[in-house]
Image (cartoon, coloured by chain):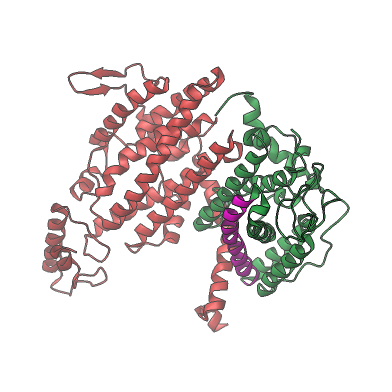
Chain colours: A red, B green
Amino acid sequence: MSTASVQRTSGAGQDQAPRPGSGAPDTAALEAVFDAAVAADERIEPRDWMPDAYRRTLVRQMAQHAHSEIIGMQPEANWITRAPSLRRKAILMAKVQDEAGHGLYLYSAAETLGTGRDELLDKLHSGRQKYSSIFNYPTLTWADVGAIGWLVDGAAITNQVPLCRCSYGPYARAMIRICKEESFHQRQGYELLLALSRGTEAQHAMAQDAVNRWWWPSLMMFGPPDDESAHSAQSMAWKIKRHSNDELRQRFVDICVPQAESLGLTLPDPELTWNEERGHYDFGPIDWAEFRQVLAGQGPCNDQRITQRRRAHEEGSWVREAAAAHARKHSGVRTEGEAAA
Amino acid sequence: MTATAETAPVLALGDDALVLSHRLGEWAGHAPVLEEEVALANIALDLLGQARVLLSLVGDEDELAYLREERAFRNCQLVEQPNGDFAHTIARQLYFSTYQHLLYARLAAAGDGSGPLAALAAKAVKEVAYHQDHARQWTLRLGDGTDESHRRMQRGCESLWRFTGELFQPLGGAQGPAEDVRPGSRPGGVGDGGLGDGGLVVDWAALEADWLSSVTAVLEEATLSVPDGPRRGAWSAGAGRQGVHTEAFGRMLAEMQHLHRSHPGASW
């Protein structure tokens, strides 16, 4: 641990409120230490002092990320029972399992900031916290599993690799592991589409159709354009975020165009052309009205996804209660309610 | 595709693993707690891995999984039973993983005597030990948890009980359980565990006794009563091994095979 973080930690625990009368100067001093640590690219750790807004931003972002992992299981799990070969079935099950695992790491990372999984799930179920809008699109054919791997996981990696250097330690460390697995997911998606593209005419058409439907929503995954992004500037200053939405989107487009060519598939954008001057691909306008509509709950599967999540949670409540009751019985610890009874 | 006397037991074990893996895969996105999304998928993946090894010993894994009709499957009826609630799934896991663990332990102990199954059994017995522990832990939590979980767990155990007798019918012969295969029928031995000319050389009566005592111990510790109904019946016991299944199985296969069959000859 560096000297700066020792200073930040000692006597500056989150639960130690500043003394009355001396609060303002103390906070200013702590903030200066915090700012210096962020500026020096040091990691902020759970016991370090941090501004409330930094904590809130991180909890919101990690929760949204965790929610996206567990809601994101649904569109792919939709194909587990219909996977067309045993090899593909094994890969898909492993992938969906990884997503549950990512959800676990991320809820744990959020817990280091004092917000438990139950509270976050409650916010998801009641619509007070969001998940990535991309999962409100349906998986209509087997090729959608490939398109999700190639494009959706590809976009997620582009977004997430910089998070491995995020200023908050537990989040950065969780992201290192997650990115390794996501990179496998992305490759399996590409490989799945390649097999379809080089397969029968019907398989090729299935792959092209999936790419046509998933391309634009994938570009929307990077969020609104920079000049309309509500949280970006502060997150960049805190080094939670390292690159702007538009920068990451451009990077993704530049990666995908040659990959689509190797796949033998076309991207559904007639304006997609190499711009020698910029050294990037130009691409057509994104339909932000659609993005806002899906975000507002009017996407094809918003209701379906959240209803399934709530149902799984509600139908599982007796199981969780049983586990808790069993643990209490066998640990000798009784709840207040039981003690009173 | 007809199984020979030698491959019939391998096919039966492969179908068990394939079908149970599929059922567990149906839980994805529906589990009661995130940890169980991971655990159930893990068990499903282990079983699918076993199924692929076993089916490949018999023929092409995808042809066997996707192109056979319902009547050609040799899995026991227990594994094809729909998931029901979480307690029902756990009861199925307890019954089946206990059986699988005892069987694979014997086959692994027989070493080369298990022929092509030896390597698979040695690996699978370790995986299945974990599956059995998972089922046991949940049986204890649910049986000895709340009134509701106790009631549900008891109901799950009761309703699947009648499918457990089938597990101990000797596996052998191309047409299902061969009457001429008896425990220790190999020349010169009463070997327990191994692949004989006509099927698995396993002391099935001893296996059943071990199964019953293991399951009884778990149920009693979980404050559940051991079901007292028959474990074999005119219809339920022994039928799956001969290709007679329950209604839900055809529907499961329809879903599993639909895409593969819609594109004849395609590779994926």
Residue B24 in magenta? no
In terms of secondary structure, what is the magenta stretch mainly? helix
Residue B252 at what x, y percent from top left?
Answer: 69, 41
Residue B18 at what x, y percent from top left?
Answer: 65, 45
Residue B194 sits in which quadrant? bottom right
Residue B121 in magenta? yes
**Which quadrant is the N terminus of chain A positioned in?**
bottom left
Residue B225 at what x, y percent from top left?
Answer: 74, 71
Residue B192 at what x, y percent from top left?
Answer: 73, 60
Towards the viewer: B114 or A142:
B114
Identified at 64% across, 34% down, the residue is B60
Placement of A16 over or under A311, stated as above or below = below
Residue B53 sits in which quadrant? top right
Towards the viewer: B138 or B198:
B198
Placement of A215 over or under A107, stated as above or below = above
- Magenta residue span: B118-144
**Which quadrant is the C terminus of chain A positioned in?**
bottom right
